């Protein structure tokens, strides 16, 4: 196969990686398996245009994207309904989409898996037409990201530490909003501190990622916790991957959902695959079944990453 690698030198763990050395290893691994590869090292400000250009190149079979959540999301958007496959380099902080695909979490191990990988069709979701691979969220998660963005960090561990601090501050002073959520013709009006809508349901017993990336449904998680103690218990359950046993979270599934913001006196933000955006008064989210081809480890090696 012909690979085009687009690596965001400003994204994820690639910011602190020797990209010349890594590019040499990438080339060696793929050519040893009789593939060809063109490598593009790109500044963060140019990553979206570089991915679109790679997606449009004739003769390419696989676009290998490396960077943070934004890079992977932009790559998936560029390749939606394309005949080219996406290879997700696990160069982000948590790499949740990559974990759901069974991709090894070490960069060099991921390259070896890609060299012998298989192409598989999985789902994408979208919020008002903007594709996402992992999650759309409002409330708690959005506030945490806003607070984290104000902190300084220069590494993956630094970002994790900043996330912990931001999460603590968020729990100590949680947001509250009144929303109307329409799922399959049923309208739910509620006051909530947070809602997450995922590209397929999260699996149990591990970090929040989908065990079935081609399950064909949105996972809709509505936080009913309001008090600090409830939020702390909810966070502890989430950290252990206890979704079904979490009394503080209502879980729904659907192919489409509509979210209306009823709290009009404040401006809220949403998070789409880790990136902050203004929250519109009405947002429509839907699943797009098998709209993205991805390169995954061969079936006999495709044990989910822990």
Image (tube, grey):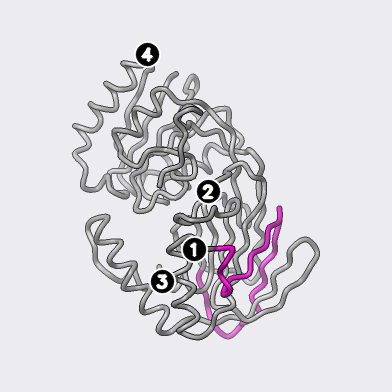
Q: Which of 96 and 37 is in front in this view?
A: 96
Instruction: Tell whether 114 sits left or right of 184.
Output: left
**Range of residues picked out in magenta:** 243-269
Instruction: Report which residue position mark 3 lands on.
Output: 144
Q: In this view, does 284 lie above or below 34?
A: below
Position of residue 94 relative to residue 110, above or below, is below
Image quadrant assignment for residue 4: top left
C-alpha gap between disc 1 and disc 2: 12 Å
Residue at 46% in and 83% down: 229
Q: Do the residues labelled 1 and 2 touch (CB within 8 Å)?
A: no
Q: Name the residue under label 1.
A: 271
Report if the CB atoms under discs 1 and 3 are less than 8 Å apart: no
Residue that label 4 marks: 34
Q: In 3D space, how far apart are the residues under numbered discs 3 and 2 (Cα atoms)?
A: 20 Å
Q: Gap in Å between the C-alphas at discs 3 and 4? A: 45 Å
Lower sequence index among marks 1 and 4: 4
Q: Which of disc 2 and disc 4 is earlier in sequence?
A: 4
Residue 185, percent from left and from top: 80, 64
- CB within 8 Å, label 1 to label 4: no
Q: In this view, does 265 lie to the left or right of 47?
A: right
Name which residue lies at 53% across and 65% down.
137
Q: Residues within 10 Å of mark 1 (few under 14, many from 20)?
A: many
Q: CB under 8 Å between callouts 3 and 2?
A: no
Residue 145 occupies which quadrant of the picture? bottom left
> In which quadrant will I find the N terminus?
top left
Q: Report which residue position mark 2 lands on.
A: 133
Q: Position of residue 87 (x, y in %)?
A: 44, 34
The magenta stretch spans residue 214: no
């Amino acid at each position: 196969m012909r690979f085009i690698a687009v690596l965001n030198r400003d994204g994820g763990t690639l910011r602190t990686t020797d990209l010349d050395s890594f590019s040499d290893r990438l080339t060696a691994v793929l050519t040893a398996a009789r593939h060809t590869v063109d490598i593009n090292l790109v500044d963060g400000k140019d990553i979206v245009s570089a991915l679109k250009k790679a997606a449009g190149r004739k003769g390419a079979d696989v676009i290998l994207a490396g960077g943070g959540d934004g890079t992977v999301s932009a790559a998936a958007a560029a390749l939606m309904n394309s005949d080219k496959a996406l290879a997700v380099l696990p160069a982000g902080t948590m790499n949740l989409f990559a974990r759901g695909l069974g991709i090894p979490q070490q960069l060099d191990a991921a390259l070896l898996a890609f060299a012998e990988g298989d192409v598989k069709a999985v789902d994408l979701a979208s919020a008002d037409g903007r594709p996402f691979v992992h999650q759309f969220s409002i409330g708690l998660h959005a506030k945490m990201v806003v607070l984290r963005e104000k902190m300084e960090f220069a590494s993956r561990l630094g970002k994790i530490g900043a996330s912990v601090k931001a999460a603590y501050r968020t729990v100590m002073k949680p947001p509250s909003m009144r929303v109307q959520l329409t799922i399959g013709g049923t309208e739910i009006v509620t006051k909530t501190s947070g809602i997450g809508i995922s590209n397929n349901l999260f699996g149990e017993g591990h970090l929040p990622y989908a065990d079935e990336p081609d399950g064909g449904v949105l996972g809709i998680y509505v936080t009913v916790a309001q008090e600090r103690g409830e939020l702390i218990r909810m966070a502890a359950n989430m950290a252990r991957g206890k979704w079904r046993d979490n009394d503080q979270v209502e879980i729904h599934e659907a192919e489409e959902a509509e979210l209306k913001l009823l709290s009009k006196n404040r401006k809220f933000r949403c998070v789409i695959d880790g990136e902050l955006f203004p929250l519109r008064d009405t947002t429509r989210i839907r699943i797009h079944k098998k709209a993205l081809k991805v390169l995954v480890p061969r079936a006999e090696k495709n044990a989910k990453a822990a």
